[in-house]
Structures are given as C-alpha cells and as structure tokens.
Amino acid sequence: MASMKKIMIIGNVGRDPESRFTSDGTEFVSFSVAVSERPRRQQGGDQAPAGNQEELTTWFRVTAWRKLAEIVKQYVQKGTSIFVMGTLRVSEYTGNDGQKRTSLDITMDEMQLLSSRGAQEAGAGGFDEGASFGGAAPARPSASYGNRPPAAAGGARPAAPAPFEEDEGDMPF
C-alpha cells in the first residue's frame, strides 16, 4: 500500500539561507521558517479578548537541494514571507543544557515567495494578496522539484482561478 507524508507551511524566513556542499559536490541550502498563530478561543469556548491574544510560533528547519538551492540563494533572505511544501521529519535530541528538544525538519519540494524583494528591502515584507489570487501583480519566483506539465504553447499562461471571498477569522496568521 502506498503512503505519503507532506507538509505545507506559510511563514517568515528567520535567518538567511546557508549554502553548503556534500562530499560529492551536491549543493544544499538550509534556513529556518517561523509559522505564527494566535489561539482562537479561551477555555470554556469564549472568544479571547483582543488584548489577551498570545502568539504561538513554531520553527521549522528547511533544506533545499540542487536547483531549488540555487533559487533559494538568489531570492530568499531573512524576513521573506514564503510558502513551502515538502517532506516532514520529526526528530528528538538532547540539548547542551540536558533538556529534550524536538526538531521539525522539512526537505523542500516546492516553494512560492509571498513577498517581493522590493517590499523586503523597503521593510514591508508582508503578504501580497494580488499575487496569490491571480491579480495583476507581477509573477513571484516559485520552484518545484519533480515533474510538471509543460507550459502552454507560445508562453501563454492558463486562465487564473476566480478570486474567492475569505473570512479573516479563518486566516492562519
């Protein structure tokens, strides 16, 4: 029986990508991504008051290999808002202080930048809704590893999906 374990995250890059090479010369890049969320409800099911919402942050260590590593080096930097899809590996280790720790490691298969380089340099660095829902914003660098269907003839892009209405209460960040 076939099985699959994939994870998709949207977060902010916590440190600049670090490039390294294996002994056979294969390049890989590693960086961290922070995914933040606010608790939706307090105990008892009541909505938490706006001033008392505590943000919870989960850190992931992301590794990109070969061509993806080259793309990450070129476009990703600390503060970049990014979508990452890949394979999750959870491991436990004992830290220098003797405490047990858990490491969440993702081997990247696909990525999509959600903030433009110009916005990052200006300090804005936020989520650009126009680029993600087929608006008129310029294309963002994205990459995937594996088989993708060839582009349409003449470089034409397929029609963008129709925008949909979102309930801001359902946003994960």
Image (cartoon, rainbow, N blue to C red):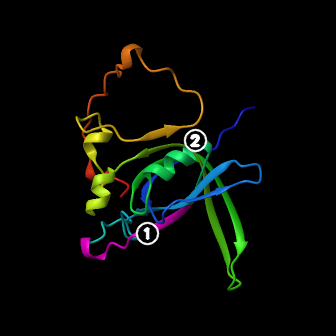
Picture residue at 26% right of the left edge, 52% below the top: 168
The three-letter code of the residue at mark 2 reads Lys
Which residues lie in the magenta part?
50-60
Q: Residue tagged by mark 1?
A: 56
Residue bearing mark 2: 67
- Whether residue 125 is visible, yes or no, is no
Q: Position of residue 64 (x, y in %)?
A: 59, 49
Would you place residue 27 above or below residue 131 in this image? below
Residue 33 position in % (x across, y down):
49, 60
Calculate the distance from the C-alpha at mark 1 to the C-alpha at mark 2: 33 Å
State the image quarter where residue 46 is shown.
bottom left
Query: Please, what secondary structure does the residue beneath circle 2 have?
Result: helix
From the viewer's side, name the closer residue of 54 and 143: 143
Residue 63 in view: yes
Rendered location of residue 73, percent (x, y): 50, 52
Which of marks 2 and 1 precedes in the sequence?
1
Q: Is residue 131 magenta?
A: no
